[in-house]
């Protein structure tokens, strides 16, 4: 049956209801009217913008550049094309949403998904996954490299075989957009780091000691969010002191972050906050803080996962985050891949703006990010 459904990229997502008073948390929050005004103004200025550039310094283009006409959708539908999804690691809310967006849009385009792989952040495993997937002779591979160097040769083989490559977040070393791959689709990871820095500053009233838990790997987007957070704190909030930075390499990111936080809370008793590089490490930070009876600790992060969303809903420790839009990113990746089958030339870097999420807008943000209603355990956790 001919599919004529058309997905149109949303306009830049507005900042959702972030003007509520910063003092409305379960744990005591230090109020500072000047800092609150400064943060609110900064977030308003960020609305709809993309601060990040691509892995090779490319200027970002909006997701709307990938939109397909009804006629183009019908043409792709008649091709009988196939696709594979090769993840760095799966099972988390971000990866699940990316896959959901890809699955929905590929189904609308009549493109069959022949494989979905999970490398568990192991470059060797991902190389093997690429080789296994290539044996299925897909027309398209959508992937996120675990390591841009170690996986480059495998991706190059796929490109040389004529497979249309669309990347999430980063491109392998040595491959060229428009020649070896179609495009890179990403959230504004630098902007998400900036957002989380402002939210951390508001929760602290602009003063206090904080620590950073970063991703200790050659991984473009996590480095961007780290840079966005640290630069924003250092340039805008001189009374917030970054007293320690610790890296985690995984694959047990929650466990690694918990171990680091245990040490930080012991070594720095007056530590007021911790920034974790994404939601899974933030879960480890929360676990350590509970164990140490430090539920007053302020935690900022990126990515709207279930557990950090519940903490936001309860006003417990997580004070805010910058969210990606992984479902929309998956839809955009599918559109770009389909356009490449039609011979369309795509921009090398497509990005969507950051979404600030706090207690006040967490339920609405969940629907924006995942395109479904908040699950019952999240909705039932919300406290006014």
Image (cartoon, rainbow, N blue to C red):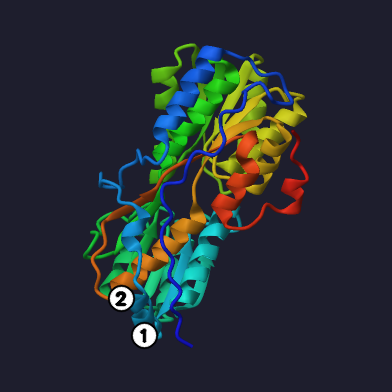
Residue beneath disc 1: 79
Q: Earlier in the sequence, mark 1 or mark 2?
A: 1
Residue beneath disc 2: 341
Which quadrant is the C terminus positioned in?
top right
Position above or below: 319 against 244? below
The answer to whether mark 1 and mark 2 are in CB contact below 8 A is yes
Residue at 62 percent across and 58 percent down: it is 372
Residue at 57 percent across and 49 percent down: it is 251
Q: Residues within 10 Å of mark 2 (few under 14, many from 20)?
A: some
Residue at 29 percent across and 66 percent down: it is 156
Q: Residue 160: x and y, percent?
A: 26, 73
Where disc 2 sits, the SS reads: helix
Q: Residue 186: x and y, percent?
A: 40, 51
Q: Looking at this view, is 7 or 173 the one in front?
A: 7
Q: Looking at this view, is 320 or 54 the one in front?
A: 320
Position above or below: 383 against 23? below
Q: Residue 96: x and y, percent?
A: 57, 59
For marks 1 and 2, give the CA distance: 9 Å
């Amino acid at each position: 049956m001919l599919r004529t459904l058309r997905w149109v990229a949303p306009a830049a997502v507005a900042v959702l209801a972030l003007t509520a008073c910063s003092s409305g948390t379960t744990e005591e929050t230090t109020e500072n009217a000047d800092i609150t005004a400064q943060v609110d103004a900064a977030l308003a200025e960020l609305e709809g913008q993309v601060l990040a550039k691509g892995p090779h310094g490319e200027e970002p283009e909006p997701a709307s550049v990938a939109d397909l006409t009804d006629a183009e959708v019908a043409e792709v539908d008649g091709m009988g094309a196939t696709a594979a999804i090769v993840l760095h690691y799966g099972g988390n809310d971000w990866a699940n949403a990316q896959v959901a967006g890809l699955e929905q849009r590929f189904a609308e385009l009549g493109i069959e998904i022949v494989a979905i792989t999970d490398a568990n952040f192991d470059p060797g495993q991902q190389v093997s996954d690429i080789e296994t997937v290539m044996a299925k002779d897909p027309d398209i591979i959508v992937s996120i490299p675990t390591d841009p160097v170690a996986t480059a040769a495998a991706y190059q083989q796929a490109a040389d075989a004529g497979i249309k490559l669309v990347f999430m977040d980063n491109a392998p070393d040595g491959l060229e957009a428009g020649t070896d791959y179609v495009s890179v689709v990403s959230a504004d990871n630098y902007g998400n780091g900036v957002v989380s820095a402002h939210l951390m500053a508001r929760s602290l009233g602009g003063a206090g000691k904080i620590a950073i838990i970063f991703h200790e790997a050659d991984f473009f987007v996590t480095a961007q969010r780290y840079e966005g957070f640290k630069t924003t704190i250092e340039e805008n909030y001189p009374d917030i002191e970054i007293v320690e930075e610790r890296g985690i390499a995984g694959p047990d990111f929650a466990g690694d972050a918990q171990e680091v936080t245990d040490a930080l809370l012991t070594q720095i008793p007056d530590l007021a906050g911790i920034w974790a590089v994404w939601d899974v490490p933030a879960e480890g930070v929360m676990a350590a803080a509970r164990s140490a009876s430090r539920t007053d600790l302020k935690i900022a992060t990126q990515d709207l996962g279930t557990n950090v969303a519940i903490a936001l809903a309860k006003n417990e420790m997580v004070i805010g985050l910058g969210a990606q839009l992984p479902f929309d990113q998956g839809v955009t990746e599918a559109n770009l891949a389909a356009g490449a089958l039609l011979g369309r030339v795509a921009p090398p870097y497509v990005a969507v703006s950051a979404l600030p999420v706090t207690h006040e807008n967490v339920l609405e943000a969940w629907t924006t990010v995942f395109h479904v209603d908040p699950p019952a355990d999240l909705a039932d956790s919300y406290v006014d």
